[in-house]
Image (cartoon, rainbow, N blue to C red):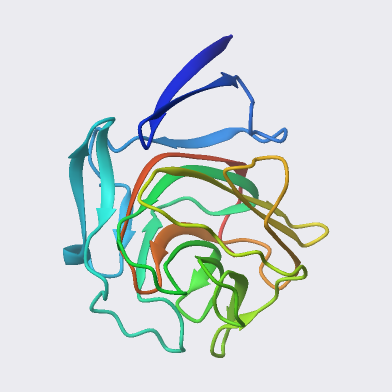
Amino acid sequence: MVRHLWVAVCGIVMVGVLGAGADQAGLPLLVSEDFEAGADRWEPTDAKAWRIVRADSGNVYEQWKTKSKYSPPYRSPLNISLLKDVVVGDFVLTARVKNTANKAGAHRDVCIFFGYQDPANFYYVHMGRRPDPHSSQIMIVDDAPRRMITKNKSPGIPWDDCWHDVKVVRRVTDGAIEIYFDDMKQPRMIASDKTFAWGRLGIGSFDDTAQWDDIKIYGNRVEKP
């Protein structure tokens, strides 16, 4: 069954087509989260930094404080909310996100976390406005401060005050990591790394604020070793 989705984006009405399996990549749907029932399935590093708020489209999950009360063992993002009880190998994550920092800084960002095994071992993508070794890069935290593993030259993420579509694709066998922003056919960042073959998934930012909605996760559920 195919349905049409009408979305108002910054005053412009856009139409897209969603079909069953549009982003599945052959993987089963594990999570479909619209936050209408709250955020009980999420585990933030600081519960006081996150809340459910009402937007034009319904409930959204908002990280509204720029610095969570959390001290990671190595230099890495503070603002994280992890999905509970879902551990995956291969996966495709799609979401709608709106950066609410309302600033023009080079590092205006949101982050998506994956392969999360513990606070000292995980991947994340920093979707920042202007690229540098720590901004707009695919990063790894591997018992050491974060470091970039991006293979291509990232063009940066053109944040504004609108909602945007993001997607993360992970294939464990060849180590592939692909990051998409609005254009779901051409990745903006790619990497290849086999360090973490499983882990949890999460959302957040390094030092900004954001709202999240319509998160879908397709993947292979695995047991934590």
Work out whether 168 lies above or below 124: above
Nearest the eye: 26 or 4? 4
Which quarter of the image is occupied by the N terminus? top right
When asked about the image quadrant of residue 2, the answer is top right
Give left or right: position of 50 versus 218.
Answer: left
Give left or right: position of 26 versus 7.
Answer: right
Q: Residue at x 38, y 68 (%)?
A: 104
Q: Residue at x 40, y 43 (%)?
A: 163
Work out whether 91 lies above or below 33: below
Q: Residue at x 53, y 54 (%)?
A: 87
Give left or right: position of 45 versus 148.
Answer: left
Nearest the eye: 214 or 128? 128
Residue 39 placement (x, y as % from top left): 26, 46
**Figure disc tally:** 0
Residue 19 placement (x, y as % from top left): 60, 19
Which quarter of the image is occupied by the C terminus? bottom right
Residue 83 placement (x, y as % from top left): 40, 53
Nearest the eye: 92 or 62? 62
